[in-house]
């Protein structure tokens, strides 16, 4: 909680960046947002924090993927697709993707990272890591990124969410090699 206290119980992360909470299954649910809560931590170590998107100025409840001098956050975006015909018919175009954000340690603001193959990706990551020339040399163009950071294939057929493992590698490298 923003007042420094902790709540323990059952919770659900819902749409609209809200948190639904019950102390026990029998209790009445309470709804919280960024005004009352700063972060949510699950027993299995996943951590979600409220951060402000620099561009949209909106508060997002977002998962922290990498913690360090530069934090990496992710948000899974679902597109339900279109139902063709009657109920029970196939759904066309359903997909999911991982949207990454970066933010400096102890900052309330985050910035979206475009796809790694976009020019703006290098521009944004360079701005966030401008204090480390070694790292900047490694990400100065797509060829260097491919040389220094290996793209790993999905380890599971069930991993249907499109994500790029190189982004996590880059942030981890920056955090461990750049003061």
Image: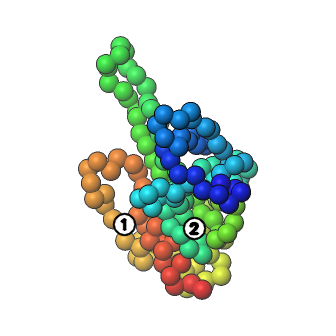
Q: Residue at x 69, y 49 (%)?
A: 36
Residue 20: which quarter of the image?
A: top right
Secondary structure found at label 2 = strand
Residue neighbourhood size for the residue with mark 2, other residues' Cα within 10 Å, grouped as few (<14), some (14–19), many (≥20): many
Q: Which residue is mark 1?
A: 151
- Image position of 49 (left or right of 92): right
- Image position of 151 (left or right of 36): left
Considering only vertical position in the picture, is 161 above or below 124?
above
Coordinates of residue 175 in the picture (x, y in percent): 53, 78
Colouring scheme applied when the structure was drawn: rainbow
Q: Residue at x 47, y 51 (%)?
A: 98
Q: Residue furthest top?
A: 86
Q: Which residue is mark 2?
A: 71
Residue 111: which quarter of the image?
A: bottom right
Q: Quadrant of the C terminus?
A: bottom right
Residue nearest the observer in this picture, 140 or 100: 100
Q: Quadrant of the N terminus?
A: bottom right
Q: Mark on residue 169?
A: none
Residue 137 visible in rendering? no
Q: Residue at x 58, y 59 (%)?
A: 101
């Amino acid at each position: 909680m923003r007042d420094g206290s902790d709540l323990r119980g059952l919770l659900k992360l819902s749409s609209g960046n809200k948190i639904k909470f019950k102390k026990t299954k029998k209790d009445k649910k309470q709804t919280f947002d960024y005004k009352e809560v700063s972060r949510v931590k699950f027993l299995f170590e996943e951590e979600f924090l409220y951060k402000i998107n620099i561009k949209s100025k909106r508060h997002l409840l977002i998962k922290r993927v990498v913690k360090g001098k530069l934090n990496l956050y992710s948000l899974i975006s679902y597109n339900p697709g279109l139902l063709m015909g009657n109920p029970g018919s196939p759904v066309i175009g359903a997909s999911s993707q991982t949207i990454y954000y970066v933010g400096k340690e102890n900052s309330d603001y985050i910035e979206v990272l475009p796809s790694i193959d976009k020019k703006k990706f290098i521009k944004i990551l360079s701005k966030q890591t401008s204090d480390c020339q070694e790292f900047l040399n490694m990400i100065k163009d797509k060829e260097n990124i491919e040389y220094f950071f290996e793209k790993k294939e999905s380890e599971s057929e069930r991993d249907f969410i499109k994500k790029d493992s190189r982004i996590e590698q880059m942030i981890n490298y920056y955090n461990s090699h750049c003061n």
